[in-house]
Image (cartoon, helix red, strand yellow):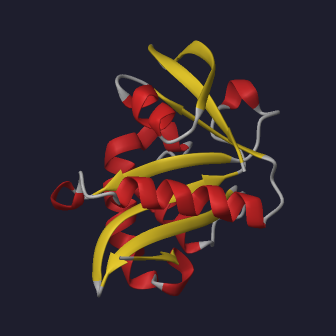
Amino acid sequence: MKIEHLKNCESFIELLAIVQFEHWGPLTGRDSLEQYKALLRGTEKSADLIASLVALEGDKLLGSVNLVENDLPVHRELTPWLAQLYVFPESRCKGVGAALIQAAVAEAKHLNWPKLYLYCSGTLPDYYKNLGWHRTEALDYQGKTRIIMEIAT
């Protein structure tokens, strides 16, 4: 498995936009699939996408993760954020998600960001805790309790 920047694998943009927007629609800050595709293509004027990373095995897409400037409107002071981690079902439980997260943390460090943030819900805080993330706050956002987590890069 290797991790690449999406800009080097543009043939996957359409599929990733569909999958990510289907899963997180309103949480992406975009109102339509077309707007989200523009974000991933880098053609959106107000894009806050820092990097989009993909996991590949040969020419097979295993998953992806984004680094964004701001992912939570109620905490604009926190930046950057790990967002839209997605691993295709057939690639789950094989370390793909952890590898993407590790690559995102390394990318944030390379860009001289001292911390990286995310928010999640359900059982995901335990998953991220096992990868070294720390819980900083719980809040209600879009009708659900979300846990904000951070990691030093």
Q: Is residue 35 left or right of residue 12?
A: right
Q: Is residue 105 visible?
A: yes
Of the pair 74 and 66, the residue shown nearer to us: 66
Q: Residue at x 45, y 36 (%)?
A: 130
**Quadrant of residue 54 within the rendered picture:** bottom left
Q: Residue at x 62, y 65 (%)?
A: 51
Q: Is residue 44 left or right of residue 99?
A: right
Of the pair 48 and 30, the residue shown nearer to us: 48
Q: Position of residue 68 (x, y in %)?
A: 65, 52
Of the pair 88 and 75, the residue shown nearer to us: 88
**Quadrant of residue 147 within the rendered picture:** top right
Q: Is residue 32 visible?
A: no
Q: Position of residue 82 (x, y in %)?
A: 58, 48
Q: Residue at x 58, y 13 (%)?
A: 139
Q: Position of residue 101 (x, y in %)?
A: 51, 54
Q: Position of residue 21 (x, y in %)?
A: 39, 50
Of the pair 54 and 46, the residue shown nearer to us: 54
Q: How many numbered discs sit on the rendered protein?
A: 0
Quadrant assignment for the N terminus: bottom left
Q: Is residue 119 above or below residue 33?
A: above
Q: Is residue 150 above or below residue 114?
A: above
